[in-house]
Image: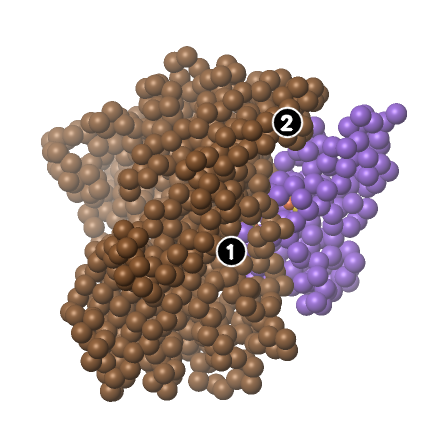
Chain colours: A brown, B purple
Amino acid sequence: MSMHTKGDGPGLTRRQFLKTSAYGGAMLLTLNLPGKAQANQSPGAASQWCVYVSIRPDNSVLMASPVMDMGQHMKTAGPMLLAEEMDLDWSLIEFADSCPAYFKLNADGQAEYAYSDMSTGGSHALRRNWDYMRQAGATVRRMLVEEAAARWQVSADDLRTANSYVYHPDGQRQFSYGELAEQAAARQVKPQAVQLKHNDAFGIIGTARTTVDIRQIVTGKPLFGMDAEYPGMLHAVIARSPFIDGQLLSQEAQAAKQVAGVRQLVNVPRRTEASYNGTTKQLMAPGVAVIADSLWAAMQGKQALRARWQAGAEGKSQDSEAQLAEFHRLVSDADYAGQSGISHKVRLAEGDAKTALEGAATVLDATYEVPLFAHLCMEPFNCIADVRSDSATIVAGHQFPDKVVNDVAKATGLPPLNIEVISHRMGGGFGRRWEVDYVLEAVYLSQQVGKPVKVTWQREDELEQDCFAPAMVMRVRAGMDKSNKVIAWHHRQAQTRGGARDRCFPFKLVPNYLSEHLDYPSQIATGAWRSPGHLQWAFAAESMLDELAHQAKQDPLAFRLKLMQPHKAYPHEGFGGELIDSGRMAKCYEKAAEMADWQRPRQKGIGLGIAGHFTFGSYAAFVLEVAIGAENRLHIRQAWGAIDCGLAVNPNHIENQMQGGFIDGLNAALFNKADVQGGEMVTKNFHQIHFMRLSEAPPDVQVSIIHSQAMPTGVGEPPIGPAAAALANAIFAASGQRIRRLPIADAIRI
Amino acid sequence: MTIQFTLNQQTVEVAERDKDMPLLWYLREQQGLKGTKFGCGIGQCGACTVHYNGMAMRSCSITLGQAQGADILTIEGLAPSEDKLHPVQEAWMEIDVPQCGYCQAGQIMAAAAMFKQHPNPSEAQIEQAMTNICRCGTYVRIRKAIALAADKLAKEVS
Ligand code: FES
Ligand code: FES
């Protein structure tokens, strides 16, 4: 697609205006202008745009990101878009720590973003801000240019901007943005005059930029919610039920209250809401909150409290291992499934997979198992709430500040616009920071105590109250004809709860395709886990492709490349993109393989595995080299990854995500497994759930970014998908062992 | 009776009754030094790593009583000055290691302590010293930053 778009809104009849306000001696530009993103709104509705930028007289700039950071690097990428179109000198920008959250009411009385979309999830933050931030930047640039033109009495179209200066055509004269800003801010520009840059004129987009917070991070500055203070706040640590639907058996309230610094205990009721899939979703776990002057006192109080819990009636029977066994039965035995009242729901059907399997020359039938994955955000959750009679302030790191506002409004009855959200950098999110339990707890306690309260979770809380990635068992039957062409694919999946990712390849590439789903009525809480369901799906699909290739005695890379033929963009009816393109996928496989020198024979005991996946509009493929040594010990030697995420906005951070995301995926494949027994979450801390250390991770992950002019798509999640399959396929290549069950560390030592 | 120790080159005193308080919470809550992070509280993750007499230690697992007489250094005290960072911090910046950043102060403290013992660490020494969890998986860049820091330190010495 062409990136050259004119900022032409609905036309001149709509008034444009610009407000200025003093902000620490500098100017905060807040402008309203019509824009493309609002084109589908009713004509005449005023649409607002805001630039999170102040230009100071000394030409320095204070900029706030439209989206907070949780490690996905939007706090750097967002400002890059703005700075690009403004033609700012990047070195003159100072980046604000927090991310301003402005809301307005929509027709349903719900809060929505007044300016740019602050949420981060689904690898969509960059896409959602792409038009907005560029239009905003281009508008500011035009205002500065018109101000300079007026002063020089020349045409604005003859002026040039670069590095925070406007240049006169005579080549002699120039104005800094700082000199122009105050007057420029009062200008009105015609939407038609606002021009976005051509891709080839980009000087910031497409270049490697460093994390804007880097200095604060390496010097240990208090950037995170965990570090936040609030005037007059008390601390709360909550003894929560580790059981699904648990009840308090006993506690030693007196002992807890005697701990120095402990002020009071507050019972926290269980709150639930009906979930979209007919189950009950827990919003707040039942617990006893210890309110204290310091976090340490509250932690000691919780220990002294010795709260004991018992399983509730609903949750008691829940057992993750038993459920996995049940999933195996469900996918293998259609009669059994029918008797249990759980029917196969057909999700996708093209051609006739069952008949084609009957007529196939070769059929492989394999079942893949994935346990519950825990999130393990590095920063345990925390939130400060100050709920007053008419308003509230929430200080937290959350992926979706709009959800925070609406859910707090619902819980308190306060008007949404009276709720202020102060966002902090997040120590990881991975989808878990979609939930608002830690926010609602702080809100509830602030209401009960009548003071600002900070709730801080401990690691045990984070695991006990997790909403896991669903455990699943996937049975794939795949058939090839005599020429080893894949002609049939039947995927049958039973799982804890949630959807499947069956619109990814080999869907569309195999003529007879059937995807069936068995929705098991589990009570174990599940939620979004970085690239929800994709790693699991790709583990089954890309392992099966590998099994088919070996069965056909073909090179696994060549086998995949053949499957991708003819290169074609197919319509994709799923979240993340309108098209899924086998040619773009093929290029990633080829590039990763080329980097790995795929054809070079390795020593005995060393093997290469390949896997690729399409997620949220982006394509990623990895080759992994492993060695299997004495005593079946695994050594991960190196990885090579290629990604096509459209136009590469910040290659530095794309590389960082490709490395870290792939390692997260390898960790999930090797180690991540949470256990529920008798309705209790029994995996409590890092001594029971291992997280990959430096010595276990690949020493190097080389990354290649496929050159593209397509609309930028996400990079936070796409590197995860291929990881488990790449590892399983590499282990097979190195040792002949086919891994079909995660976590792999149960079968192979590392 | 008080407990005395050195914290970032300053002598500090705490009351004997606080002897069981983990150093981590003293640093964060009483000293306002928030760079030392809480991740697990059981000595596993390393987010709370500080230097204890020059060695990398997990401050969630050291009590104030155990800190008596010790020399404690936190991330806030690692840089020689405001303008001049420690070579490990410089390397971390140049390689742009972090993703979320939460673990990184602990990683930097672990690396800085390793360099005191092994100015030119081998692969095995790096793997032995760097046991902190990075949930975001920045290990590839941590290795690169360690290599760069080793170069910087070698230049400083020569
Ligand atoms: S918080 Fe100390 S090791 Fe995790
Ligand atoms: S950078 Fe996020 S945990 Fe290490």
Q: Chain of mark 2?
A: A
Q: Decide which of tag 1 and tag 2 comes sooner along the chain.
A: 2
On the image, the x and y values in percent for residue A353 come to 20, 70
Q: Residue at x 30, y 71 (%)?
A: A477
Judge from the rendering whether residue B8 lies leftward or rightward of residue A238; answer left or right: right
- Give the quadrant of residue A435: top left
Above or below A190: residue A623: below
Q: Which residue is mark 1?
A: A672
Judge from the rendering whether residue B23 lies leftward or rightward of residue A160; answer left or right: right
Graded by Cα atoms within 10 Å as few (under 14), some (14 to 19) or many (20 or more), the crowding at tag 2 reads: many
Which mark, residue A305? 2
Q: Is there any visible trace of residue A94 in the rendered image?
A: no
Q: CA distance from mark 1 to mark 2?
A: 31 Å
Above or below A373: residue B68: above
Viewer-nearest of discs 1 and 2: 2
- Give the quadrant of residue A566: bottom left
Mark 1 vs mark 2: same chain? yes
Residue at the limit of the structure toward the right, as seen here: B1
User: Which of A269/A550 is in front?
Assistant: A269
Judge from the rendering whether residue A707 lies leftward or rightward of residue A662; answer left or right: left
On the image, the x and y values in percent for residue A189 come to 22, 35
On the image, the x and y values in percent for residue A19 come to 30, 26
Residue type indicated by callout 2: Leu
Residue type indicated by callout 1: Asn
Which quadrant is the N terminus of chain B positioned in? top right
Which quadrant is the C terminus of chain B positioned in? bottom right
Q: Residue at x 51, y 50 (%)?
A: A675
Q: Chain of mark 1?
A: A
